[in-house]
Image (tube, rainbow, N blue to C red):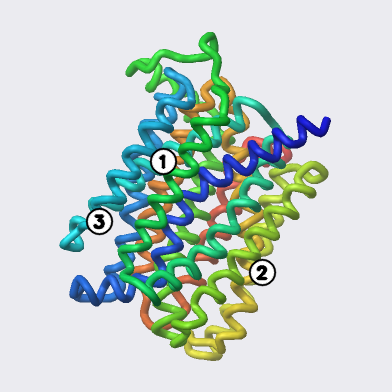
Amino acid sequence: MNKANTETKAFILLLAGMMSLVALSVDAMLPALVTIANDFDLAQTAQAQWTITSLFIGLSIGQLIYGPWSDAVGRKPPIYWGYSLFIVGTLICVFSESFSWLIAGRVLQGMGAAAPRIITMALVRDKLKGAEMARIMSVVFSVFIVVPILAPAIGQLIISVAHWRWIFGMLLIMAVSTGFWFWRYQEETLQEEQRRPLTVKSFIEGLRFLLAEKAALVYTVISGLVFGSFLGYLNSAPLVFIQLYDQQDNFALLFAAAACAVGVASLVNGRMVLKMGMRKMIIYALLGLVVLTSLFCVVLLASNGVPHLLMLMLYLVPAFFCIGILFGNLNSLAMEPLGAIAGMGSAFVACLSTLIAIPIGSLIGLSFNDTCYPIVLGFMFVGLGSLTLIKVFDPLEQTKA
């Protein structure tokens, strides 16, 4: 039993480390966005958010490739290629002489990071299912959420003593270390007899399988909406805290407070999901987000869109607790019917949700108008829209009705 527990803990830590590559690539850059805008003489500071959005564009492309590929050749080879591509993209970012080259490097980083990000979901699905899968994913999210908590502080520390390009040096170290750990200690989880040939026909069949599974499709779309609001927050956070509230020195601490709420929610969800089920947890979290946001809209109206910083944090912390409940459950519920095509299914789910999230997150970020309205209204739209989708399209809800 002790050996099994040790192996499970090592598996969770490895998955968390691999998934953290994306989180670290995003959040460590946030304190540097204003500096990047100044260094490249961008017309508007908000344009610097493309260093975040471009990584997710690469991520969405890579996810669609690595999932089906991993179903055909196993989980390990695509991850090796992904790490290699990430390293190349990182080196381009280090030596970029223009903002365009920086964006190109970030796209390659995203395409590379997609391999460990997407295939970790297939690794879990290979070994587990149902509420147990959701429990493990919640624990994984709670472990890897430490990275978003610390990443802005790490990025801020780096730019306080060196050039912001040294952030990419840190990412290079992270990629090499987790890649080596995976190569050395993780066994292949997809056996030869379970692999599916990678053909156009199999790709189309997998897509049809997803589209035929209404529950998987509904929760994939909702996952995209929730991720979109979160991406909008990531794009806007430096502008809100640094420009609007003049909190350059405290940015990492303020960002960590919201990230901690997501981590706590993941731990709570890991315990509660076995009793209540994924679907109930999702509905309660969405209702909580809508109620919180409705109340905070009153505060926004009374303060012309710029409430006291304390009031903003009193809203963001519980709001991100709701977001944390949603993250693990939405992915697990979307993946639950797709066990027969775990790799391809995880690719479709992740790609579609990311493609939905990118325009939503970009719209929220580019709508920054020296108020908190864009972020808050984004959360309201996501909460109401997601509850509507569940009510109208979820097969379980229709059966109950």
Q: Secondary structure at mark 1?
A: helix
User: Would you place residue 334 above or below residue 287 in this image?
Assistant: above
Describe residue 380's horizontal placement relative to residue 208 as left or right: right
Compared across the picture, whether 222 is left or right of 295 comes to: left
| Image x and y of residue 9, in percent | 70, 40
Q: Identify residue type, mark 3.
A: Ile
* Amino acid type, callout 1: Ala
Badge 2 element: helix
Lower sequence index among marks 1 and 3: 3
Residue where numbered disc 2 is placed: 318
Q: Looking at this view, is 122 or 336 the one in front?
A: 122
What residue would you read off at disc 1? 114
Spatial CA span between label 2 and label 3: 33 Å
Q: Residue at x 49, y 60 (%)?
A: 230
Tell me the kind of residue under disc 2.
Pro
Q: Residue at x 37, y 62 (%)?
A: 167
Q: Are marks 2 and 3 in contact (CB under 8 Å)?
A: no
